[in-house]
Image (cartoon, grey):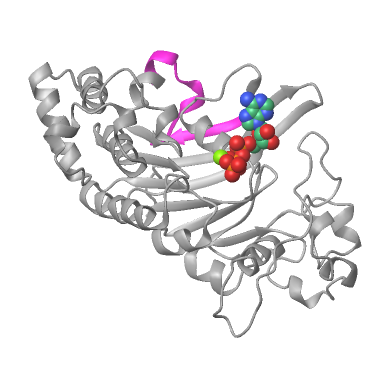
Amino acid sequence: MTTTPLLQIENLQVEFATRGGAVHAVDGVNLTIEPGQTLGLVGESGSGKSVTARAIMRLVPTPPGRYAGGRILFEGKDLLGLSDGEMQSLRGGQISMVFQDPMTFLNPVFTAGEQVAEAIRAHQGASKGEARAKTIELFRTVGIPNAEERFSAYPHELSGGLRQRVMISMALSSRPKLLIADEPTTALDVTIQAQILDLLRHLQDEFGMSILLITHDLGVVAEMCDKVAVMYAGQIVEEASIEPIFDAPAHPYTSGLLEAIPSTSNDGAQFRPIPGAPPDLARLPQGCRFAPRCRYRQAICQTTPPPRVAVSPAHSARCHFAGDFKKNEPEPAIAGRTS
Ligand SMILES: Nc1ncnc2c1ncn2[C@@H]1O[C@H](COP(=O)(O)OP(=O)(O)OP(=O)(O)O)[C@@H](O)[C@H]1O
Ligand SMILES: [Mg+2]
């Protein structure tokens, strides 16, 4: 029996018009999130993670951006086909988003509580008094101490961790089915990061929502997610549930990301950053986008874009040698390079 996924992205293409030509920020992305699931989206800076997230919210600025193809099905409905009004009621309603930096999101001239209460009033038609009471209750749920006093605090009067909790409480106020969290903890120190991730996990149990968690940190993915999609130069290069990705990455890029985690475990395997940089998205290489940096590349990798290869039913990678790239002799010129 098949159920409708909560979110299904099919062959999504998002481009930006720039002076250097069209930048293919998202180029044929497929992603699926089931109800209650957490999907981790990882990849280096500039790989298209935030553009993917913004596209789901239909928040890509157009122009310079353009939805150039594909579908974003939310409970089977294509978000790219909705009117602005329909989209607006979904946004901050059934789908909400938490951003990396709460200060760009919170309005400095209103108190934290007023802003959350206003969101509740806008989406749920609550009275002023009800919205205030709900806000204070939400502040307690997300672990804001002295919630009643904090209602009247301005954003700049709160610590980074508290601001992030305010933004999370706003995102949760509508009991969304999908929460998109774009690097929700990278601006915070490690202890607060752990607290916020704990909070998200706990809230997910309580609210039963699905989460799209965007992060650079594979450790966070291992702890929080059911499955992971690895993004490189606008494409998903590997997708699987957590264990296969960490135990047997099928794509050399994922393997490289894992080797780049500073770690003392893993019997002496040293910390080794991936040499080189991602390609210019306006001038992509002809073959595999990762080939210029890949230690295992062969002639075909430089001429032919790799297809998506299923290495098991729920594990796929975009690599000509998916699953057994390590059989290829690593290129010494690339292997030996350190920067
Ligand atoms: N408004 C815009 N105009 C032109 N190019 C854009 C715009 N927004 C994003 N891009 C380009 O799209 C590409 C993907 O950007 P995106 O922000 O999605 O990366 P990211 O994976 O989220 O990176 P990071 O980890 O640094 O947040 C980048 O090359 C970026 O320059
Ligand atoms: Mg980003």
Total numbered labels placed on residues in the image: 0
Residue 118 on image: x %, y %: 23, 20
Give the vertical position of 38 relative to 131 (above or below). Answer: below
Asked whether residue 289 is in view, the answer is: yes
Vertical comparison of 22 with 232: above or below? above
Q: Quadrant of residue 174?
A: top left
Q: Looking at the picture, how far across and down is residue 149, in whole percent?
A: 14, 33
Q: Nearer the viewer, residue 71 or 64?
A: 64
**Front-most of residues 252 and 142:** 142
Look at 56% across and 73% down and name the residue there.
Answer: 263
Q: Is residue 71 magenta?
A: yes
> Quick check: 290 left or right of 228?
right
Measured as percent of width and height from the top left, residue 291 is found at 82, 56
Give percent across and percent down for residue 266. 57, 81
Q: Which quadrant: the C terminus?
A: bottom right
Q: Farthest residue in the front direction?
A: 157
Question: Which residue appears at 66% of the width and 67% of the height?
Answer: 255
Viewport quadrant of the N terminus: bottom left
Q: Is residue 104 left or right of residue 163?
A: right
Examine the image and state in which quarter residue 137 appears.
top left
Identity of the residue furthest to the bottom in this view: 267
In reply to whether residue 332 is colored magenta, the answer given is: no
The residue positioned 89% from the left and 52% from the top of the image is 303
Task: Evaluate whether residue 67 shows in this view.
Answer: no
Residue 286 shown left or right of residue 204 in the figure: right
Q: Quadrant of ligand 2?
A: top right
Residue 198 against residue 242 in the figure, above or below: above
Q: Residue at x 29, y 32 (%)?
A: 157
In the rendered view, tell whether residue 135 sits above or below residue 263. Answer: above
Numbered range of the magenta stretch:
67-86
In the depicted view, which residue is nearer to us: 165 or 325? 165
